[in-house]
Image: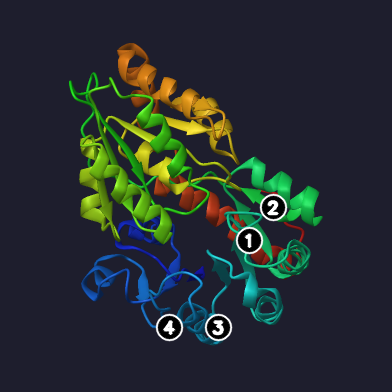
Amino acid sequence: MRVYWYWPYLRSEQLPLVDSLCALDCDVVAHTVASRITAADAQRGRGAIDRSLSDVGDERERSMRWLWSRATIYPLRSKARRHKASKGFDVAHVVFLNPFTDWFALRRLSRRVALVASVHDAVPHQSRLPRWIEHLILRRLYAVCGEIVVHHATVSRQLQEQFSVDASRIHEVPLWVLPAPFELRERPNDVPTVLCFGAMRRNKGIEVLLAAIANLADLNATFVFAGRGAPEIEHALTQAATNDPRIKVEIGYVDEERKHALHRDADLIVLPYTSFASQSAVLHDAYGHGRPVVATDVGALGETVRDDDTGVVVPAGDPHALATAIRESLCDEPQWLRHARQATAVGELRSPVVYARELLTVYEYAIASRSGLRASRP
């Protein structure tokens, strides 16, 4: 089977996903930009990595240069994808959808190849359009994007209830956990480290976590924030680090090596999101490194952590509850160890190999459906 992956921001650490699919006798071409994966890394795997997609600028969000960059680059990417995916592939998998172009571009692509799309978030974390326009665009997008892969039942329910997507087109495939070097400890460090990792968007609850840290003034711990995002959040973190020596801030893009080091040093991963639409790659990074979590009950986060038994779930936007959960997670050593071991176990169950097998089933279904054959539901 020849598989085309449209994945604009494929990273080196995600190459095991390509390799695992190739191991199932698939010929995979992953189409991406050059900024996230080096030419040397692109050559080391079993699949072909095409780094020719146009890249957007790194300007501040919603600046004029930011808007212009995306307005010009997104159509170029769509055209390059159509040209590439039409070259003899059995299936095209759009790993990340772009609502601004794909609601009309994918209809044309679906005439040329069996189409699969991943929907990570049924609605955006941050709306950039009036709600009614956003809903109209998304409804049209989900109508033309082929078979749909989601990583949690919550997203499936949203697609069906809010956008009238036929359940027969939705395939639930749990989000992958990438293998990572980690140190499985029996207890937290004497001076534990609490890590808040990832993009610092306005919905990530950074200000709630800062308030929780203020409520933990007597706790001898280190609180690390790593990532980049909204300027006002970056400024608030920098100011907080100035006022509280327990707070350490790393503003900027975090590469793979540094991400592993941050998780290896951490004793607890906190996801204090105030609003969220779906599943979280940050949560699965915690699993890959065998670390327990404290997460808020938004999107699929709370449900996932409860089902996996990998940490503590608290209401969103409640600094007191968040502070209490952080303290208890670090001080209750038997609970901490149980959650850490369970995170490790869940990571093994959602390995790239398992993910690739489930994707292959979806691809076979998509190809058979497009050929007019009676495909059995995976």
Measure the C-alpha gap from mark 2 to mark 4. 30 Å
Do callouts 1 and 4 mark residues in contact (Cβ within 8 Å)?
A: no
Numbered label attached to residue 153: none
Do callouts 3 and 2 mark residues in contact (Cβ within 8 Å)?
A: no
Measure the C-alpha gap from mark 2 to mark 1. 24 Å
How many residues crowd mark 3 within 10 Å: few (<14), some (14–19), many (20+)? Answer: some
Q: Which residue is mark 2?
A: 170
Question: Of marks 3 and 2, which one's residue comes earlier in the chain?
Answer: 3
Q: Does 65 appear above or below 178? A: below
Do callouts 2 and 4 mark residues in contact (Cβ within 8 Å)?
A: no
Measure the C-alpha gap from mark 1 to mark 3. 17 Å
Q: Position of residue 10 (x, y in %)?
A: 39, 65
**Closer to viewer: mark 4 or mark 3:** 3
Local SS, label 2:
strand
Quarter of the rendering containing residue 57: bottom left
Quarter of the rendering containing residue 136: bottom right
Check disc 4 and give the amino acid type: Ser
Q: Residue at x 35, y 55 (%)?
A: 235
Q: Which residue is mark 3?
A: 71
How many residues crowd mark 4 within 10 Å: few (<14), some (14–19), many (20+)? Answer: some
Q: Does 112 appear above or below 237? A: below
How many residues crowd mark 2 within 10 Å: few (<14), some (14–19), many (20+)? Answer: many
Q: Position of residue 204 (x, y in %)?
A: 48, 46
**Closer to viewer: mark 3 or mark 2:** 3
How many residues crowd mark 1 within 10 Å: few (<14), some (14–19), many (20+)? Answer: few
Measure the C-alpha gap from mark 4 to mark 3. 12 Å
Do callouts 2 and 1 mark residues in contact (Cβ within 8 Å)?
A: no
